[in-house]
Image (cartoon, grey):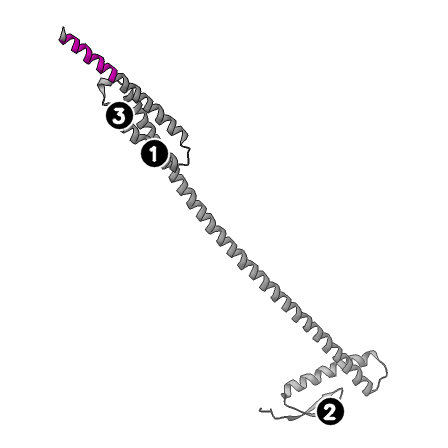
Amino acid sequence: MFMKEKTRHVLKVYSQDISLFSSDSEEYMKNLASFVDKRMRNFSRGISRISFGDLCILTALSIADDLHKGKWKAEGLKADKQRLEKDLSEAFTRIMTLEAGIREKDSRIETLEEKVRELDLSLSTKIENKEAMTKKLNVLSYELRKPLTERNVEKDLEEAYALLEEKDVQEEKDGQGEEGAQDEKDKLLEEKVEENEDLSSETSSNQMRIFDEIKE
């Protein structure tokens, strides 16, 4: 390793010339000598009689005290800096965790909103289907109450079966029970059977009456 060459410096401290070798610059060495000189003169002003050796010791102790206090302060500042850096790192980690939690909640909210929209659409569709089904049942009920001569019984029965089966499927999809649909189906079928029996009876009576008229 390259070592910087040392040069000889002559410094004046407390009116005395001191010669020494150093690798530092002339200006730096003079600043050190001026600092020590001022510190020695400050001590000498408060003491009436003191030897040069004792003055040098007191000055050295004073400078050492400043050095140690500065070192301890620097160590305290370093510890504070490390503690602040640790706190900052922990705070940054918490912020990142909170941001991740917020993003996750935002995603869940968007998912829930999408599900709500799907449910609204599904509910609207079910309501429309139910209204259409009710309208068809009302029409069919009206048709079933017409005189037998105005309608086709077999066709009405087929339409009733098809419509009721469609209603059963729709109610199963909507989560509704089947008992109400079955009761309605049975009621309509009973009406159909009774009307068919009346029609058959009426037809048979008419046939017998016509036959009797022909015989006479």
In percent of width and height, residue 51 lies at 84, 87
Identify the image quadrant of the C terminus. Answer: top left
Whether residue 208 is in magenta: the answer is yes
> For this rendering, which residue is in front, 54 or 146?
146
Whether residue 212 is in magenta: the answer is yes
The crowding category of the residue bearing disc 3, from other C-alpha atoms within 10 Å (few below 14, some 14 to 19, many at least 20), is: some
Query: Left or right: where does residue 198 sit relative to residue 171?
Result: left
Which mark is drawn over residue 17? 2
How far apart marks 3 and 1 lie (CA) works out to: 21 Å
**Which residue sits at x=84%, y=80%?**
47
The crowding category of the residue bearing disc 2, from other C-alpha atoms within 10 Å (few below 14, some 14 to 19, many at least 20), is: few
In what element is the residue under mark 3?
Answer: helix
In what element is the residue under mark 1?
Answer: helix
In percent of width and height, residue 8 lies at 66, 94
Say what amino acid the circle numbered 2 marks: Asp
Mark whose residue sits in front, 3 or 2: 3
In percent of width and height, residue 58 lies at 80, 82
Tag 1 near tag 2, CB within 8 Å? no
In percent of width and height, residue 72 lies at 71, 73
The crowding category of the residue bearing disc 1, from other C-alpha atoms within 10 Å (few below 14, some 14 to 19, many at least 20), is: some
> For this rendering, which residue is in front, 173 or 25?
173
In the displayed structure, would residue 122 be above or below residue 185? below
Could you tell which of marks 3 and 2 lies nearer the N-terminus? 2
Question: What range is drawn magenta here?
Answer: 200-214
**Residue for badge 3:** 156
**Residue 38, quarter of the rendered image:** bottom right
